[in-house]
Amino acid sequence: MAANGLDALDARLLLLLADEPRLGVLECSRRLGVARGTVQARLDRMSERGVLRGFPPELDLVAMGFGLTAFATLEIAQGKRAAVAERLAVIDEVCEVHATTGQGDLFVRMVARSNADLQRVIDEVVAVPEVRRTSTSIALSTPVPPRVRPLLVRLAEQG
Protein backbone atom coordinates (compact mmCIF):
# COMPACT_ATOMS: atom_id res chain seq x y z
CA MET A 1 0.00 0.00 0.00
CA ALA A 2 1.32 3.44 -0.92
CA ALA A 3 1.93 6.10 1.72
CA ASN A 4 -1.19 7.95 0.56
CA GLY A 5 -3.35 4.90 1.22
CA LEU A 6 -4.00 4.01 -2.42
CA ASP A 7 -2.05 1.37 -4.27
CA ALA A 8 -2.03 0.33 -7.92
CA LEU A 9 -4.95 -2.09 -7.48
CA ASP A 10 -7.05 0.62 -5.81
CA ALA A 11 -6.24 2.97 -8.68
CA ARG A 12 -7.11 0.33 -11.32
CA LEU A 13 -10.40 -0.38 -9.52
CA LEU A 14 -11.27 3.33 -9.41
CA LEU A 15 -10.37 3.75 -13.09
CA LEU A 16 -12.61 0.81 -13.97
CA LEU A 17 -15.52 2.30 -12.03
CA ALA A 18 -14.88 5.77 -13.43
CA ASP A 19 -15.18 4.33 -16.95
CA GLU A 20 -18.11 2.03 -16.18
CA PRO A 21 -19.83 3.08 -12.93
CA ARG A 22 -22.58 0.47 -13.27
CA LEU A 23 -20.22 -2.50 -13.00
CA GLY A 24 -20.87 -4.83 -10.11
CA VAL A 25 -18.30 -6.09 -7.65
CA LEU A 26 -18.16 -9.53 -9.30
CA GLU A 27 -17.46 -8.08 -12.75
CA CYS A 28 -14.80 -5.76 -11.31
CA SER A 29 -13.10 -8.72 -9.65
CA ARG A 30 -13.19 -10.68 -12.92
CA ARG A 31 -11.67 -7.84 -14.93
CA LEU A 32 -9.01 -7.10 -12.34
CA GLY A 33 -8.15 -10.75 -11.77
CA VAL A 34 -8.68 -10.66 -8.02
CA ALA A 35 -11.17 -12.21 -5.60
CA ARG A 36 -14.61 -10.67 -5.18
CA GLY A 37 -13.92 -10.22 -1.48
CA THR A 38 -10.77 -8.25 -2.28
CA VAL A 39 -12.72 -5.82 -4.45
CA GLN A 40 -15.47 -5.47 -1.84
CA ALA A 41 -12.98 -4.90 0.98
CA ARG A 42 -11.15 -2.23 -1.01
CA LEU A 43 -14.39 -0.46 -1.95
CA ASP A 44 -15.48 -0.54 1.69
CA ARG A 45 -12.12 0.81 2.88
CA MET A 46 -12.10 3.61 0.28
CA SER A 47 -15.69 4.51 1.18
CA GLU A 48 -14.88 4.60 4.91
CA ARG A 49 -11.88 6.85 4.26
CA GLY A 50 -13.90 9.19 2.04
CA VAL A 51 -11.88 8.45 -1.11
CA LEU A 52 -14.95 6.97 -2.76
CA ARG A 53 -18.03 9.04 -2.00
CA GLY A 54 -20.61 7.26 -4.11
CA PHE A 55 -21.61 6.52 -7.64
CA PRO A 56 -23.65 9.48 -8.85
CA PRO A 57 -24.30 9.88 -12.56
CA GLU A 58 -22.19 12.43 -14.40
CA LEU A 59 -24.47 15.32 -15.27
CA ASP A 60 -24.03 17.88 -18.04
CA LEU A 61 -25.07 21.29 -16.71
CA VAL A 62 -25.27 22.77 -20.22
CA ALA A 63 -27.69 20.04 -21.31
CA MET A 64 -29.70 20.77 -18.17
CA GLY A 65 -30.06 24.41 -19.28
CA PHE A 66 -27.27 25.99 -17.20
CA GLY A 67 -25.02 27.17 -20.02
CA LEU A 68 -23.17 29.84 -18.07
CA THR A 69 -20.45 29.09 -15.54
CA ALA A 70 -18.94 31.90 -13.50
CA PHE A 71 -16.35 32.15 -10.77
CA ALA A 72 -16.48 34.74 -8.02
CA THR A 73 -13.81 35.69 -5.54
CA LEU A 74 -15.43 36.92 -2.35
CA GLU A 75 -13.90 39.06 0.34
CA ILE A 76 -15.84 38.48 3.55
CA ALA A 77 -15.95 39.79 7.10
CA GLN A 78 -13.21 38.25 9.21
CA GLY A 79 -14.20 35.15 11.11
CA LYS A 80 -17.42 34.69 9.12
CA ARG A 81 -16.36 31.96 6.67
CA ALA A 82 -18.71 29.31 8.10
CA ALA A 83 -21.68 31.69 8.18
CA VAL A 84 -21.09 32.80 4.59
CA ALA A 85 -20.59 29.23 3.37
CA GLU A 86 -23.86 28.24 5.04
CA ARG A 87 -25.71 31.07 3.29
CA LEU A 88 -24.09 30.28 -0.07
CA ALA A 89 -25.04 26.60 0.24
CA VAL A 90 -28.74 27.49 0.04
CA ILE A 91 -28.29 29.21 -3.35
CA ASP A 92 -29.03 26.37 -5.76
CA GLU A 93 -26.79 27.69 -8.53
CA VAL A 94 -23.72 27.74 -6.28
CA CYS A 95 -21.89 24.52 -7.19
CA GLU A 96 -18.68 24.84 -5.16
CA VAL A 97 -17.15 27.10 -2.54
CA HIS A 98 -13.45 26.96 -1.65
CA ALA A 99 -11.69 28.84 1.16
CA THR A 100 -8.59 30.44 -0.37
CA THR A 101 -5.48 32.41 0.39
CA GLY A 102 -4.58 35.65 -1.33
CA GLN A 103 -6.79 38.59 -2.19
CA GLY A 104 -10.11 36.89 -1.59
CA ASP A 105 -11.41 34.64 1.13
CA LEU A 106 -13.76 32.37 -0.82
CA PHE A 107 -13.74 31.16 -4.42
CA VAL A 108 -17.21 30.29 -5.72
CA ARG A 109 -18.22 28.38 -8.83
CA MET A 110 -21.79 29.11 -9.91
CA VAL A 111 -23.97 28.39 -12.91
CA ALA A 112 -26.83 30.23 -14.57
CA ARG A 113 -29.19 29.94 -17.52
CA SER A 114 -28.40 33.37 -19.02
CA ASN A 115 -26.64 36.65 -18.27
CA ALA A 116 -29.78 37.96 -16.61
CA ASP A 117 -30.01 34.79 -14.54
CA LEU A 118 -26.34 35.16 -13.58
CA GLN A 119 -27.06 38.69 -12.39
CA ARG A 120 -29.83 37.29 -10.17
CA VAL A 121 -27.43 34.69 -8.71
CA ILE A 122 -24.72 37.32 -8.12
CA ASP A 123 -27.32 39.54 -6.44
CA GLU A 124 -28.14 36.65 -4.09
CA VAL A 125 -24.46 36.17 -3.32
CA VAL A 126 -23.79 39.84 -2.57
CA ALA A 127 -26.94 39.99 -0.43
CA VAL A 128 -25.19 37.79 2.12
CA PRO A 129 -24.47 40.36 4.86
CA GLU A 130 -20.90 39.22 5.55
CA VAL A 131 -19.82 39.51 1.88
CA ARG A 132 -17.80 42.73 1.61
CA ARG A 133 -16.60 42.64 -2.01
CA THR A 134 -16.85 40.36 -5.05
CA SER A 135 -15.07 39.92 -8.34
CA THR A 136 -16.77 37.71 -10.89
CA SER A 137 -15.49 36.17 -14.12
CA ILE A 138 -17.52 34.24 -16.69
CA ALA A 139 -15.98 31.05 -18.04
CA LEU A 140 -15.87 31.09 -21.84
CA SER A 141 -14.92 27.42 -22.15
CA THR A 142 -13.52 24.53 -20.12
CA PRO A 143 -10.42 23.27 -21.94
CA VAL A 144 -9.53 21.00 -18.98
CA PRO A 145 -12.64 19.80 -17.14
CA PRO A 146 -12.49 18.58 -13.53
CA ARG A 147 -10.56 15.33 -13.51
CA VAL A 148 -8.75 12.80 -11.37
CA ARG A 149 -8.04 10.23 -14.07
CA PRO A 150 -4.39 11.24 -14.70
CA LEU A 151 -3.63 10.79 -11.00
CA LEU A 152 -5.28 7.35 -10.97
CA VAL A 153 -3.41 6.29 -14.13
CA ARG A 154 -0.08 7.28 -12.56
CA LEU A 155 -0.92 5.36 -9.36
CA ALA A 156 -2.06 2.32 -11.38
CA GLU A 157 1.20 2.32 -13.34
CA GLN A 158 3.32 2.45 -10.19
CA GLY A 159 2.14 -0.99 -9.12
Image (spheres, grey):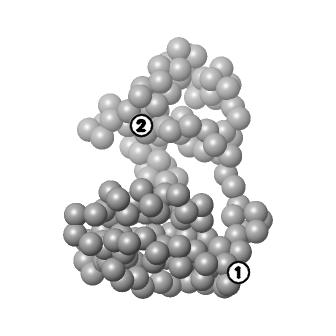
Q: Residue at x 34, y 71 (%)?
A: 130
Spot occupied by residue 56 in the image (x, y as percentages of width and height): 63, 43
Q: Secondary structure at mark 2?
A: loop
Characterize the local packing of mark 2: few (<14), some (14-19) or many (20 or more) Cα atoms within 10 angstroms.
Answer: few
Q: Nearer the viewer, residue 62 or 80?
A: 80
Q: Is residue 112 visible?
A: yes
Q: Amino acid at mark 2?
A: Gly
Which mark identifies residue 47? none
**Horizontal side, residue 18 vs residue 88: left or right:** right
Spot occupied by residue 141 in the image (x, y as percentages of width and height): 61, 79
Q: Nearer the viewer, residue 106 or 7?
A: 106
Q: Is residue 7 visible?
A: no
Spot occupied by residue 62 in the image (x, y as percentages of width and height): 72, 69
Q: Please, is residue 135 above or below residue 110 in the view? A: below
Q: Nearer the viewer, residue 104 or 50?
A: 104
Q: Secondary structure at mark 1?
A: loop
Q: Please, is residue 17 above or below residue 32 in the view? A: below
- For residue 140, what is the image quadrant? bottom right
Q: Nearer the viewer, residue 126 or 40?
A: 126
- For residue 82, what is the image quadrant? bottom left
Residue that mark 1 sits on = 114
**Horizontal side, residue 61 vs residue 153: left or right:** right
Q: Point out the image quarter for the C terminus.
A: top left
Judged by depth in the image, the label closer to the viewer, 2 or 1, is 1
Q: Residue at x 67, y 78 (%)?
A: 117
Mark 2 vs mark 1, CA separation in Å = 35 Å
Mark sitting earlier along the chain (2/1) = 2
Characterize the local packing of mark 1: few (<14), some (14-19) or many (20 or more) Cα atoms within 10 angstroms.
Answer: some
Which mark identifies residue 50? 2
Q: Amino acid at mark 1?
A: Ser
Spot occupied by residue 54 in the image (x, y as percentages of width and height): 56, 37
